[in-house]
Amino acid sequence: MALNTFDRSKARMSAAAQVLAGGVSSNFRLNISPTPLVIDNGFGPYLVDVDGNRLIDYYLGMGPMILGHAPKSVIAAARAQLDRGIIFASQTEAEFEAARLVCELVPCAERVRFGSSGTEVIQAALRLARAATGKPTIVKFEGHYHGWLDNVHWSVAPSAEACGPLERPNKVPGTPGQDPRCGDNVAVLGWNDLAAVERRLAQGDVAAIIMEPAMCNTSAIAPNPGYLEGVRAACSKAGAILIFDEVITGFRLSAGGAQGLFGVTPDLATFGKAIANGFPVAALAGRADLMDMFSSRGVMHGGTYNAHPVNMAATVATLRTLAEGETYALIEKRGRLLMSGIQATLQHHGIAARIQGFPGIFHVAFGITEPIRSFRDTFPIDRARYIKFTTALVERGVRALERGAWFLSSEHDESVISATLDAVAGAAKAVA
Ligand code: PLP
């Protein structure tokens, strides 16, 4: 079988770097082996790149495309809205219906506000928490990502040398140019450790605890039994606001997100990605008394593009499909098939690996077999070998993230899974 080549993507990327910084518009798209791809089009589970390679896609836009690429119902809804105008700086019926659907599906959602990116609605959540409690400190966890802004980009992927003792983790800045003072009111803890949360809350200065309720930016780690319940109870007792960042888990782990799956309801939750199947929509949802502070107490939240009518039409079409529930049943079955198929294939080729997570987003780690329960468990992962594996995969027609995450859509049917496992076998042989 001839392997895919990417000569045109490589040439276009190096030419683009003369006008577009690094050839990309997000740092997450840099430094991908054998090259960041230039895509011509996508449909169902596939992408077609400018070299003409058809690739089974497990990036899914880094998570949003839960219904696959270019689903007819979502495209039709967006197209119909486009014919009626672009933005109005007013409300629309689609916006009201999208809010109603979020409130129907998400346990914590008594009210909703829409935004355009996960990063920005997280800022709105933190502001509400400080306004409600009058306290300064936000607690976040090692390995959790809450957007790229200065006040949350701490200890997202700290090195083993930098992260300090587990009982008192260092607050490690994530980027050159970050204002160190923006970390003054941030505390970093290890995740999945209830005692650490209780100890920190006892200091009495915590406005909010923000977490990915399942840690999908590191190794698709589930919460330990009782952990979310314990943090919920501790926040209620201390008067701190519990924020679930469901930008990945929302509308992906279930129609009610991680809070629906695990049965623990936060005070506020942030959404993005799968909420609109790839249209730039984010949402902050939560308790009415908190959310109504935007209007009753003038807590500032703005945005020219918030609740953009085209995006709202796409949100309604996406959420109506997800509300039917069939998407999750399909993903559950096929995701499990894929996880066990990859595990068996790697084992057959003598590659030690740990596969864990959820059918709609799981993680493959090379070089370890023990469960990964928190960020520091990921240090021994053999990342260099895994990148050789994803490079061999894309040469065989499967595009998977180098950091180990695999996203599934309802369009990845059994034949797609079977073709994927053939490519996994070829790639495993290549790197064994
Ligand atoms: N929160 C989590 C858990 C995420 O995974 C991301 C993005 O990947 C964000 C927040 C930021 O969202 P956005 O990229 O839409 O700003």
Image: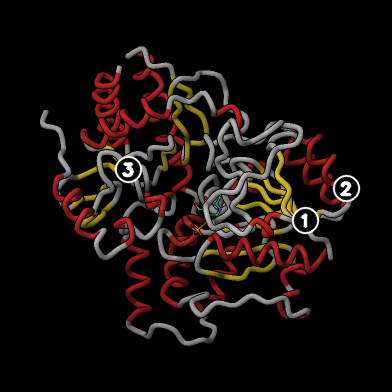
385 sits to left or right of 266? left
Amino acid residing under circle 3 = Ile
Against 76, residue 259 (above or below) is: above
Tell me the distance, in whole angstroms, between the alpha carbons under discs 2 and 1: 10 Å
Numbered label attached to residue 32: 3
Amino acid residing under circle 2 = Gln
Numbered label attached to residue 203: 2
Report the residue marked by disc 1: 137
Quadrant occupied by the C terminus: top left
Judge: label 3 CB < 8 Å from ligand 1: no
Residue at 70% across, 35% down:
192
**Where is residue 197, by image quadrant?**
top right
Which badge, 2 or 3, is on the more N-terminal residue? 3
214 sits to left or right of 424? right
Most extreme residue toward the left is: 2
Judge: label 2 CB < 8 Å from ligand 1: no
117 sits to left or right of 45? right
Quadrant occupied by the N terminus: top left
The colour scheme used here is secondary structure
Residue at 59% across, 41% down:
143
Q: Secondary structure at mark 3?
A: loop
Amino acid residing under circle 1 = Thr
